[in-house]
Amino acid sequence: MRRIGRVLHVTRAGDLVLRSNSGFVPKIGDRAYGPDLRLVGFIADVFGPVSSPYVMVRPLVDEPDELVGQVLYVGRGKGRRWRG
């Protein structure tokens, strides 16, 4: 598991926006996990400056607003190669 960043806000479409400060950039389609290490969604987009990009997560949880302020992590996606 690698830390992605802290959830900044939820978009009108219901997606989570995070800022990656660790220099680590996840791949689109990777699984995103919450602080309790439960699956919360998938990486939908990576955008912004290369030094500290924003990451958009498409949530699978019923209440994505509860994740604002929480740190999310990325884990090995099924069929993906882990480059940790």
Image (spheres, helix red, strand yellow):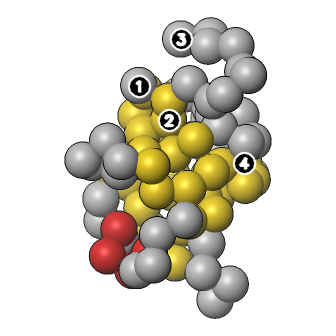
Determine which residue is flagged by label 1.
1
Please state which of residues 20 and 62 is positioned toward the viewer in this rendering: 62
**Up-down: is 27 above or below 76?**
below
How packed mark 4 is, by other alpha carbons closer than 10 Å (few <14, some 14-19, many 20 or more), is many
Task: Pick whichever of labels 4 and 1 is earlier in the sequence.
Answer: 1
**Up-down: is 14 above or below 81?**
below
How packed mark 2 is, by other alpha carbons closer than 10 Å (few <14, some 14-19, many 20 or more), is many
How packed mark 3 is, by other alpha carbons closer than 10 Å (few <14, some 14-19, many 20 or more), is few
Q: Amino acid at mark 1?
A: Met
Q: Amino acid at mark 4?
A: Val
- What is the number of the mark on residue 84? 3
Task: Pick whichever of labels 2 and 3 is earlier in the sequence.
Answer: 2
Are discs 2 and 1 less than 8 Å apart at CB?
A: yes
Mark 3 to mark 4: distance in Å? Answer: 18 Å
| Residue 20 visible in the displayed image | no
- The residue positioned 43% from the left and 27% from the top of the image is 2
Mark 2 to mark 3: distance in Å? Answer: 10 Å
- The residue positioned 73% from the left and 22% from the top of the image is 79
Determine which residue is flagged by label 2.
74
Quarter of the image for residue 57 reads: bottom right
- The residue positioned 62% from the left and 51% from the top of the image is 42
**Up-down: is 7 above or below 54?**
below
Element class at badge 2: strand
Mark 4 to mark 2: distance in Å? Answer: 13 Å
Determine which residue is flagged by label 4.
46
Q: Amino acid at mark 2?
A: Val
Task: Pick whichever of labels 1 and 3 is earlier in the sequence.
Answer: 1
Quarter of the image for residue 59 reads: bottom right
Q: Quadrant of the N terminus?
A: top left
